[in-house]
Image (spheres, grey):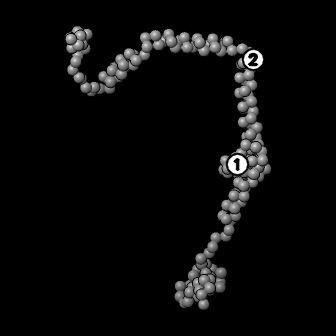
Amino acid sequence: MSEESATSEGESTEFKPITSQEDLNKILGDRLKRAKPADYEDLKAKAARFDEVERASMTETQRLQAQLDEMSGKAAKTERENHRLAAIAAEGIPAEYQDLVHGDTPEQFANSAKKARELIAKATAADAKTPISYRVNLDGDGSDSLALNGSGIEDALKKKLGIS
C-alpha cells in the first residue's frame, strides 16, 4: 500500500542520481523549505518585537547603569594601557620590543620594562662587538692579503693556539 500512495502522489520510487548543480540546488532548496517551521517569519517578527519591548521596559536607571559599566571598563583598560606606555617611555623601549612589557599594575609594568631594557642592551652589546678577523697579517705592511708561501701562517696559528 505504501507503494501505491507514493505513486499516487506523483513521486517516483526509483533512485535518480544527481547529475548537475541545478538538480542539487533544487533538492537542497526543497529540503530547506521543509526544515523551516511554517510560521518562521512570524516567530522572527515576534522575537524582534519582544527585544524592542524589553529594551523599552528597561528603566532609565538600568540604562544608565549599563552605560556606566561600559565606560568604567573602557576607563580601566585605558588607564592600564597608559601605565604600560609610561613604563615603556621611561625605559626607552623601541617599538618592535614593546610587546615584551606586560603586567597589571604600574610596578609590574616598570619591572617588566626594566627587564626588557636589559635584554635589549645585552642583545645590542653582543651585536656591537667587533667581528673576529681570521686573517693574519704576516707581511707587517697592514694589508689583509695572506702570504701563500713560507711558514708564516703556520707560525701565527701556533702562536694563537698556544702551541710551541
Hey, which residue is sitting farthest front in the picture?
1
At 70% from the left edge and 51% from the top edge, which residue is drawn?
Answer: 94
The mark nearer the N terminus, 1 or 2, is: 2
Q: Nearer the viewer, residue 138 or 8?
A: 8
Quadrant assignment for the C terminus: bottom right
Relative to 51, does residue 17 appear above or below in the rendering? Answer: below
Is 72 rendered above or below residue 64?
A: below
Give the image location of residue 136, x and y in percent. 61, 81
Question: Tag 2, which secondary structure?
Answer: helix
Task: Tell me which amino acid carries mark 1.
Answer: Val
* Label 1 with label 2: CB-CB less than 8 Å: no
- Residue drawn where x is 71% and y is 19% of the image: 63
Q: Is residue 67 visible?
A: yes
Q: Looking at the image, is 15 positioned above or below residue 149?
A: above
Q: Residues within 10 Å of mark 1 (few under 14, many from 20)?
A: many
The amino acid type, in three-letter code, at marker 2 is Thr
Report whether 30 appears left or right of 106.
Answer: left
Question: Which mark is drawn over residue 101?
Answer: 1
Quarter of the rendering containing residue 144:
bottom right
Q: Is residue 49 left or right of residue 67?
A: left
**Residue at the spot of label 2:** 61
Considering the image in quadrants, where does the N terminus appear? Answer: top left
For marks 1 and 2, give the CA distance. 40 Å
| Residue 6: quarter of image | top left
**Which marked residue is nearer to the observer: mark 1 or mark 2?**
2
> Percent from the top left, x then y, of residue 35?
40, 17
Q: Which residue is at 75% across, 47% downward?
A: 108
